[in-house]
Image (cartoon, rainbow, N blue to C red):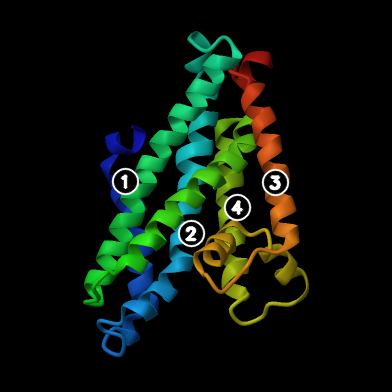
Amino acid sequence: MEQVRTPFSLVWTIMSPTVLFFFLHFNEIELHTGDTSWLRGQVSWFLGYISFSVVLFNYCLYLTGRRESGFIATFVHDMSGRLLFIRSQLIASLTMSVVYVCFFVGVVFAGFQAEPDYLTVLMVIKTLSINALMMTSMTFLSSLRITFQTASTIYSVLITVCMVFGIVSLKYDHGFISWFNKINPIILYSTLLDAQKSLSLLTIIFYGILCMLSLIAAMTFRTEPVWSSQ
């Protein structure tokens, strides 16, 4: 896998959300030491951020990069080959998300000297299940006829916007911010991980449409790079 070949990128991707979590909750370490229940409620947003990063940069961007390199055009020639390639990358990205999520949860709980319980294990399993759903619904992004560099820029802007709107909603959650956060992938993770929250009809319809678009995109996935037709 690509990130295993670049250890600095791998370490930074794993460490940065963990460092940020401790930075934001530094003054609460003594107050909530050993408080497993409180800690579970604090990590859901970060799990959403970590997981959505994997979806965009480990999954969608990888598919775009392989297409733009011309690599897959040499061996993917029909729909079954396209679906096999996409399914293989989805499984590989899910494997990486297991590493990211388990590392984050393990370090955070160890830092707060909290013992993970069965609800924590269930939270991790639910996160990975949401990852699979999110990757499935976001597959259409990799079929957009854009270059690798353009895709990287778009994904960076997208995750930044989602993160900012999620943070703003902690203080102000009305009007456009409230509507956007109903389809905000990071907020979606937090909602699904909280048993007391439920999805809105807008969220269900929106991601249902994305899943249909992604199914069509997977079956018609273009293997030729954009530059080959220019």
Residue annotated with mark 3: 208
Disc 1 element: helix
Say which mark, if any, is on residue 157.
4
Q: In which quarter of the image is residue 125?
A: bottom left
The amino acid on which the numbered mark 4 sits, given as a three-letter code, is Val
> Which of the labelled discs sits on residue 10, or is there none?
1
Q: Nearer the viewer, residue 116 or 12?
A: 116
Residue 15 visible:
yes
* Residue 93 picture location, percent across and down: 42, 39
Secondary element under disc 4, as helix, strand or loop, is: helix
N-term mark: 1 or 3: 1
Q: Which of 174 and 115 is in front in this view?
A: 115
Report the amino acid beneath label 3.
Answer: Gly
- How many residues crowd around disc 2 within 10 Å: few (fewer than 14), some, or many (20 or more)? many
Residue placed under numbered mark 2 in the picture: 49
Report x, y in % for residue 42.
42, 74
Front position among marks 3 and 4: 3
- Dot 1: few (<14), some (14–19), or many (≥20) neighbours within 10 Å? some
Numbered disc in front, either 2 or 1: 2
Q: In this view, does 213 lie to the left or right of 195?
A: right
